[in-house]
Image (cartoon, rainbow, N blue to C red):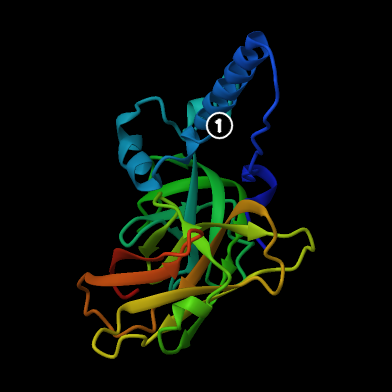
Amino acid sequence: MFTLYGFTKIAKKSLYSCKISFFCGLMNEMRNTLIILLAALALLPLASCSAYMDAVPDRDYVSDTPDPQFDNESVYGGFQAIVTVKKSVLDTVYFQLNDSTTVYPRNYQDSYTHMERVFCHATVYTESTGSFNYTCDVDWAEPLDQGSVLPGAEPQWDSVQDVLDIYDDWMTSVEDGYLTVHYNTFWGRSGIQHSFRLLMGTDPANPYSLVLLQDSHGDAGEDEADGIVCFDINSLPDTGGEYIPLSLKWKSLEGKVLERKFRFKTRE
């Protein structure tokens, strides 16, 4: 199961009512400020992949020839992305970055097993390969958990116990016929895998209205942590090459039913 639990775990800190000196309180404030600053700096590489890719051609030092005096990221421009791994009609493995941008992963051709969504780190080059927009070398790739897509009615929200929050960031997206969700939820320490269901047909008047449900299988503890899950929603009614509004509902950690809007286009 792919989660960000190991390295983006958010631990809730208790506030202690202690009689402490002014100096100790000041030191704690300085420590907390430093932690927040370091966390913010750690998230900088997670900029929007599409925005990064758009900027790459303007960087004239990006080259297909390695320069040993620089590390990879300073020479080529490393990026993190969530992509669809696919095969062309000519059996060439490629990455679908979004609805229109493709990348040829030249060191990933023997790693293909089936079409899937992966979280990867790669080094991108401005040179195109064949019909693909860019070329890259893959440093690592980790398949995402894929949830179930099922027909169903909208639930009785009062009975929904396993809640979650969804981040409004570049990882939460609808592209290439997939819904990808970067979420935060409660975890126990049993090691039990949580499962996710995406309900379709919850609104008979709108087939593009979806509901996300989680089942912790009894593992909902007191720790909060992040994860990423994707859903293949290409079975929704064909949009005919146009973008159609899509809505997603879920129950938040605060117990509120929330809704977010996306744009969906059927995968070609």
Write down the residue under mark 1. 39
- Tell me if residue 154 comes above or below residue 34 in the rendering: below
Work out whether residue 87 or residue 17 is closer to the camera in this orientation and state it: 17
268 with respect to 181 (left or right): left
Q: Residue at x 68, y 12 (%)?
A: 21
- Residue 70's spot in the image, x, y percent? 56, 21
Q: Amino acid at mark 1?
A: Ala
Left or right of residue 84, residue 20 in this image: right
Residue at 62% in and 52% down: 224
Q: Is residue 257 left or right of residue 81?
A: left
Looking at the image, the residue that sits furthest to the right is 190
Report x, y in % for residue 109. 58, 60
Picture quarter with the C terminus: bottom left
Give the structural element (helix, strand or loop) at label 1.
helix
Q: Residue furthest top?
A: 23
Residue 126 figure quarter: top left
Task: State the residue in front, 165 or 99.
Answer: 165
Q: Is residue 197 visible?
A: yes
Percent x, y of residue 82: 48, 55
Question: What x and y, as percent, mark residue 84?
Answer: 47, 63
Question: Residue 34 falls in which quadrant of the image?
Answer: top right
Horizontal relation, residue 152 to residue 121: left or right: left
Q: Residue at x 59, y 24 (%)?
A: 32
